[in-house]
Amino acid sequence: MDFIPYSTQSISEDDVAAVLAVLKGPFLTQGPTGLAFEAAFAERHGVAHAVSVSSATAGLHIACLALGVGPDSLVWTSPNSFLASANCALYCGARIDFVDIDPSTRNMSVEQLEAKLRQAEAAGRLPDLVIPVDFAGLPCDLVPMRRLADRYGFRILQDASHATGASYLGQPVGSRYSDATVFSFHAVKIVTTGEGGMVTTQDDALERRLRQYRSHGMVRESADLEAPADGPWTYEQQVLGYNYRLTDLQAALGLSQLGRMESLHAARTRLADRYDEHLADLPLSLPPRLADRQSSWHLYAIEVEPGQADRSSVFAALRAADIGVNVHYIPIHTQPYYRRLGFRPGDFPAAEAYYAKALSIPLFPAMTDAQQDRVISVLADALTGRAP
């Protein structure tokens, strides 16, 4: 019986050929393929600028820096996310806090955000930056978040690591409402470069700062230099930056994958629709469907209803059947490191309640109907107590 992963990359012969072409060419690190990937990604997402990075974590880090986050800053994010959504603020020396989730969307709750902002205003300590997270590929509700940002004076950094290809109000994620948006190209994501990411923005000045932080804090253009150039070879380090560059090898794979993003997304959507149909009568909560946004379906995350089935037993039954079930995510604030910062279980009850029920079952473009049927069958047996 073959193992069914919860997700895996989809590599075509065209992808392989694109990478080989770069291997045989003059540029392996940064060159024209990287620039072409950035331009194509920006065009596809309806945004002025796309800056490629070595990982989405790197993108979150330099986006925080470019948005002015530092030791005196306060950053809020969702507790229902991977660690990087919060760690990026701590890398900059900032303070971190969380806004609880909406139980139905599993994303940052607009109502909780507004209530916390009112309290913060009364206390005289509003956030400088809010990082909403598009969990599982479902975009956050950014229109009311933008209104709150304009009212209370904070910036928005959208963590769309799960949401490449998703849309909100008929437009690609990352094109409007946030000051910057970060995407991930990890191997299990919709488009992959192995490891890698992208930061999009409409802001020209922000794009320049992103590129500077991405490459050691350096500038080379004569107009950007603080002192007269010694010659055409001159460069200056003006800020403390990092080596967060994406290679041309990775960009070649990303550019090829981007060319079939719609078909990859369509395959995920078909499988998600099929899960919805076949799981409808089981004691589960299925992923949300909202009329004003389209998920990328990075994850198909279900909730095992307490009192009707034991999540741990269901997890064990799926793993015993060689099915790569997973759990996304352990709430960030409950991790030992964050508990040492003063956070405690019970601080964000909606995120904790979701985690107690959550399972991510396999979903990837090459998944066959037979594989999906096996997942459905084992899941149904585990939920109803039938022997496998």
Image (cartoon, rainbow, N blue to C red):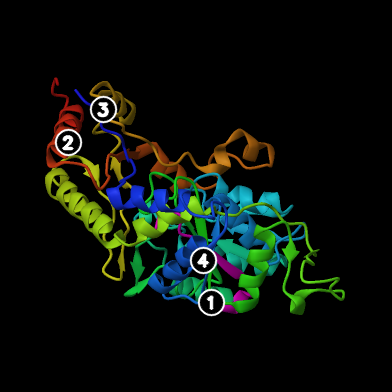
Marked residue nearer the N-terminal end (3 or 4): 3
Q: Is mark 4 on a helix, strand or loop?
A: helix
Mark 1 element type: loop
Q: Does residue 238 belong to the magenta stretch?
A: no
Check disc 2 and give the amino acid type: Gln
On residue 79, the disc is none
Query: Can you tell which of label 4 and label 2 is closer to the viewer?
Result: 4
4 vs 88, nearest the viewer: 4
Residue type at the position of mark 4? Leu
Question: Toward the viewer: 219 or 161?
Answer: 219
Sooner in the amino-acid sequence: mark 4 or mark 2: 4
Which residue corresponds to the image point at 41% horizontal and 44% vertical from the top-left? 187
Q: Which mark is residue 202?
A: 1
* Residue holding disc 2: 371
Q: Distance between the residues labelled 1 and 3?
A: 43 Å
Question: Cα distance, mark 4 to mark 1?
Answer: 17 Å
Residue 151 in view of the camera: yes
Label 2, secondary structure: give it. Answer: helix
Q: Is residue 43 above or below residue 61?
A: below
Three-letter code for the amino acid on which mark 3 is drawn: Phe
Whichever of callouts 3 and 2 sits on the residue coming sooner in the sequence is 3
Helix, strand or loop at mark 3: loop
Measuring from the top left, give residue 83's x and y in whole percent.
55, 44
Q: Position of residue 353 (x, y in %)?
A: 41, 43
Compute the Cα span from label 3 to label 2.
Answer: 10 Å
Q: What residue type is labelled 1?
A: Gln
